Image (spheres, rainbow, N blue to C red):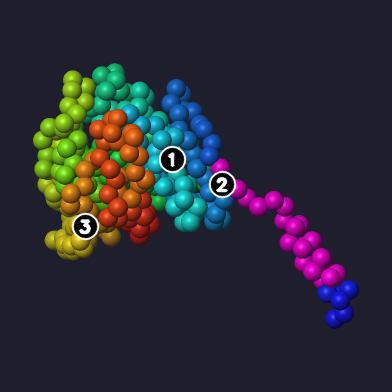
Amino acid sequence: MGPLSRVLAVLAVLLVAGCGGPAATSTTTEHTIGDRTYRLYRPASLPDGPAPLVVMLHGGAGSGRQAQETYGWDSLADREGVIVAYPDGLNRAWHVSDHCCGPPARDGVDDVAFITALVADVPGVDSSRVFATGISNGGMLAYRLACDTHGVFAAIGPVAGTQVGDCPAPDPISVLHIHGDADRSVPYDGGRSKRDSEWVRIEGPPIPALHARWQAVDACAAPSVAVTGVVTRSRAACASGRRVEMITVAGAGHQWPGSAAKPAAERLLDLDPPSDALDATAELWAFFSST
């Protein structure tokens, strides 16, 4: 092939490559359901067919935008082909019990109905692969969803949260709980939070006892326990292929492990710095994707 022929061949390849139009791009869109709002991240890498959905629930005083910017789910979604929803709690809080948390609890806001409607509102979702995670008050709502919904979620992943309020007869569901044992806002050993007030009443069980409760719900075998540095993993295999797992980070406070530190906000709001002992987002997706 002569020089001119080679040039023409290259031009032909470039022309064919360009015929597919512009490459798909990842998008964040804003949505409303009645007076409620949520953000939706849809990566360009979504495969053909229905995709998994992760509902990421912000903590008290947070927002959907803050959660999207803080916990690394967009980057994971780009790598793994996952849709991520970031709902907004009214007044930056979620109603999970009679006294938690804030105005939503005082006013009896039905956040379970909102999140359930959100899941139904998102197109292109594989209904067998819908997951809920959240931090602090958002983690408590993840437990409330497990207690009060039926067949909506395949698994939940609370971080630095607990279960408060009644939960008499939940359906079995896979659970991964991540918690620091030095958490004072949602104490690892149970009891009252350092942030308790009239409408922020957090008095959950010891986290190991909560872990054991869900093992009983899920009819699990005895858990295996592995310790690596400051990280302890308890894993239990359960009936119907479900799993109940707990990751405890020694010395870690009330935080999302692996997120970026924000020293100014931590000083201003008396927040604990995030542990770098593990990446909670990656741990949660590994658990969800194998559920």
Q: First in sequence: mark 3 or mark 2?
A: 2
Left or right, 125 with respect to 101, comes to right
Q: Badge 2: how crowded within 10 Å, few (<14), some, or many (20+)?
A: some
Are the residues at dot 1 and dot 2 in contact (C-beta closer than 8 Å)?
no
Q: Amino acid at mark 1?
A: Glu
Q: Badge 3: how crowded within 10 Å, few (<14), some, or many (20+)?
A: some
Q: Position of residue 205 (x, y in %)?
A: 12, 40
Q: Residue at x 73, y 61 (%)?
A: 17
Where is 106 relative to 41, above or below? above
Quickly name the residue at label 2: 26
Q: First in sequence: mark 1 or mark 2?
A: 2
Q: First in sequence: mark 1 or mark 3?
A: 1
Q: Badge 1: how crowded within 10 Å, few (<14), some, or many (20+)?
A: few
Residue 34 on the magenta span: no
- C-alpha distance separating marks 1 and 2: 15 Å
Where is 282 relative to 206, above or below? below
Where is 231 relative to 194, above or below? below
Quickly name the residue at label 3: 231
Quickly name the residue at label 1: 69
Which image quadrant for residue 285? bottom left
Residues rendered magenta in the picture: 7-27
Q: Amino acid at mark 2?
A: Ser
Q: Quadrant of the N terminus?
A: bottom right
Q: Position of residue 193 (x, y in %)?
A: 16, 32
Where is 169 relative to 233, above or below? above
* Mark 1, secondary structure of its residue: helix
